[in-house]
């Protein structure tokens, strides 16, 4: 499924999506194929669902996005990790 189709099926909702096929280009993450895992009327419920799935499957590429966005603009960030004390 692509983002335009998601927007038509789930108008004005928060969606928890998984990238099934994606690639990077110029610091952006481009989702070629995605799957809607669930839809929500509020962002809090969407984020709680995201946290639950991410905790059990951290390797999955998940996003919470509102369908009012006309296009996906996902910027990549480098994770530096957490420094411990010595």
Image: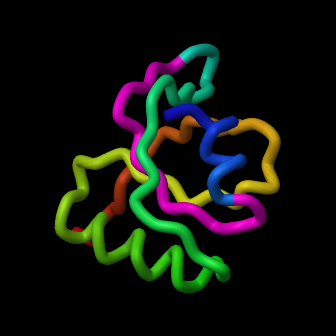
> What residue sits 54% from the left and 40% below the top?
77
Q: Is residue 83 above or below residue 62?
A: below
Q: For the image shown, how many numbered marks are present on the structure?
A: 0
Q: Is residue 28 visible?
A: yes
Q: Is residue 20 magenta?
A: yes
Quarter that holds the C terminus: bottom left
Q: Specify start and end residues of the magenta stretch as a single range.
A: 11-24
Residue nearer the viewer, 11 or 64 = 11
Q: Residue furthest top?
A: 25
Residue 84 is situated, as x and y percent measured from the top left of the image, at: 28, 67
Determine which quarter of the picture holds residue 2: top right
> What residue sits 45% from the left and 66% below the top?
38
Residue 13 is situated, as x and y percent measured from the top left of the image, at: 69, 67
What main secondary structure does the magenta stretch of the protein show? strand
> What residue sits 69% from the left and 36% below the top?
4
Q: Is residue 76 left or right of residue 54?
A: right
Q: Is residue 80 visible?
A: no
Residue 76 is situated, as x and y percent measured from the top left of the image, at: 56, 36
Q: Say how the picture is coloured.
A: rainbow
Determine which quarter of the picture holds residue 29: top right
Residue nearer the viewer, 52 or 25 = 52
> What residue sits 71% from the left and 47% below the top?
8
Q: Is residue 38 magenta?
A: no
Q: Is residue 69 left or right of residue 61?
A: right
Q: Is residue 27 left or right of residue 73?
A: left
Q: Residue furthest front?
A: 9
Q: Is residue 81 above or below residue 49?
A: above
């Amino acid at each position: 499924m692509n983002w335009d189709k998601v927007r038509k099926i789930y108008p004005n909702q928060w969606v928890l999506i998984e990238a099934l096929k994606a690639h990077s280009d110029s610091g952006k993450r481009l989702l070629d194929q995605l799957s809607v895992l669930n839809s929500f009327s509020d962002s809090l419920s969407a984020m709680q669902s995201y946290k639950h799935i991410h905790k059990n499957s951290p390797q999955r590429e998940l996003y919470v996005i509102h369908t009012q966005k006309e296009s996906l603009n996902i910027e990549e960030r480098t994770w530096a990790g957490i420094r411990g004390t010595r």
